[in-house]
Image: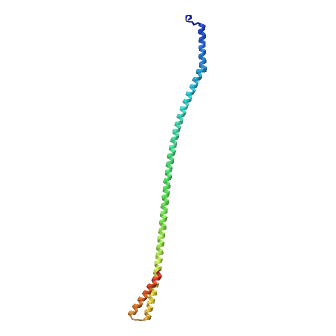
Amino acid sequence: MGELGITWANFLVQLIAFLLFIFLFWRYALGPIVRTLDARQQAIREGVETAQRMEEEMKATQARNEEILDEARREAQQILASAREVSEQNIARSREAAQVQADQLIVRARQEIQTETAQARAELRREIADLAVDAASRIVRANLDRTAQIRLVEEALSDADGRGRTSLN
């Protein structure tokens, strides 16, 4: 080794310096870099795991939201169906009530018509009776021949016709 210019003392000092350099390099340069890289790798791993957990939670939440929406849709359809049913029942009741009211109005109208018809007939009978009495009294007073009696009856009828028109108007 001497031929190469290496002495044991130099070699030993260089070896100690090299080992000291490696130790210091490891301790103050490479160690912190490795720890920083390990910490970053751990943080990235945790971030990925957190992202995966959040994605799973998001999927679970989305599934729950879909279930809630489906339930809300079903409830809305049930509410609409019951509202339709109630409105149909109300319409049916209203129709029945209207029909009953219409029937009552028809019955009242018929009764009024019958009453008015009966009153008109009674009034007509009274007028005919008055005319007959009037015609009979004229015939009895006049004691005339047949042509005169016919003429008196026709006069009484024309008088009755005149009265009837004025009473109808």
From the top left corner, tell me how far across and down residue 130 is, in percent: 46, 87
Q: Quadrant of residue 45?
A: top right
From the top left corner, tell me how far across and down residue 6 is, in percent: 57, 7
**Camera-side residue of 134 and 157:** 157
**Camera-side residue of 29 and 90:** 29
From the top left corner, tell me how far across and down residue 64 is, in percent: 52, 42
Quadrant of the drawing holding the N terminus:
top right
Task: Kindly identify the residue that appears in the image at 59 percent across and 18 percent down.
Answer: 25
Q: In the image as oriented, which residue stretches furthest toward the front?
A: 5
Q: Quadrant of residue 21?
A: top right
**Camera-side residue of 148 and 76:** 148
In the rendered image of this protein, does residue 74 appear above or below residue 86? above
In the rendered image of this protein, does residue 96 appear above or below residue 9? below
In screen coordinates, is 151 left or right of 5?
A: left
Task: Kindly identify the residue that appears in the image at 45 percent across and 89 percent down.
Answer: 134
Task: Kindly identify the residue that appears in the image at 60 percent across and 13 percent down.
Answer: 17
In screen coordinates, is 19 left or right of 160?
A: right
Task: Kindly identify the residue that appears in the image at 47 percent across and 83 percent down.
Answer: 166
Q: In the image as oriented, which residue stretches furthest toward the left?
A: 147
